[in-house]
Image (cartoon, helix red, strand yellow):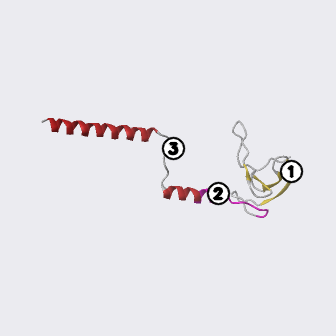
């Protein structure tokens, strides 16, 4: 009878330990969880696809054409712009993301002066 009680105590302790480990795993955020190998490789491919550089004459996502604007930024140097929207890029093709407070209209054609 004493052996049976010892086995039940060990099994219950193992179940409690397993439950504690499972809850701790679920409470950790996704950034702390280990990433599976296949998901990590897919994220690398997607990240690499987003890093495409543009050049004058390329097409924009809106359907316009990317070209030189004649504007010079103190931070980025000469700028490239799209004829159909307000997107802009640096001379070496990196996208410039502008964040304006108050929810400005995104990707709208520039207003006529």
Quarter of image, res 9: top left
Spatial CA span between label 1 and label 2: 25 Å
Q: Is residue 2 left or right of residue 37?
A: left
Which of discs 3 and 1 lies nearer the camera? The answer is 3
**How many discs mark residues in the rendered view?**
3
**Residue 63 higher or lower than 3, as above or below:** below
Judged from this view, the residue extending furthest toward the bottom is: 57
Residue 32 numbered mark, or none: 3
Quarter of image, res 59: bottom right
Where residue 68 appears, as percent x and y from the top left, is 83, 58
Query: Helix, strand or loop at disc 1?
Result: strand
Magenta segment includes 47: yes
Provide the residue span drawn in magenta.
45-57
Spatial CA span between label 3 and label 2: 24 Å
Q: Is residue 72 left or right of residue 52?
A: right
The structure residue drawn at horizontal position 58% and vertical position 57%, both measured from the top left corner, is 44
Front one among 14 and 66? 14
Mark closest to the chain's N terminus, 3 or 1? 3
Judged from this view, the residue extending furthest toward the left is: 1
Q: Is residue 17 left or right of residue 48?
A: left
The structure residue drawn at horizontal position 76% and vertical position 58%, both measured from the top left corner, is 93
The structure residue drawn at horizontal position 50% and vertical position 56%, both measured from the top left corner, is 39
Residue 50 numbered mark, or none: 2
Query: Helix, strand or loop at disc 3?
Result: loop
Mark closest to the chain's N terminus, 1 or 2? 2
**Residue 65 higher or lower than 100, as above or below:** below
Q: Which residue is mark 1?
A: 72
Where residue 10 appears, as percent x and y from the top left, is 25, 38
Which of discs 3 and 2 lies nearer the camera? The answer is 3
């Amino acid at each position: 009878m004493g052996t049976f009680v010892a086995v039940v105590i060990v099994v219950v302790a193992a179940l409690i330990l397993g439950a504690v480990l499972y809850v701790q795993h679920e409470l950790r955020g996704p950034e702390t969880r280990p990433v599976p190998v296949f998901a990590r490789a897919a994220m690398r491919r997607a990240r690499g696809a987003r890093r495409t550089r543009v050049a004058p004459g390329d097409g924009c996502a809106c359907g316009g054409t990317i070209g030189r604007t004649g504007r010079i930024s103190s931070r980025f140097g000469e700028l490239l712009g799209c004829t159909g929207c307000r997107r802009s890029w640096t001379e070496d093709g990196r996208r410039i993301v502008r964040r304006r407070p108050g929810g400005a209209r995104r990707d709208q054609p520039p207003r006529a002066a």
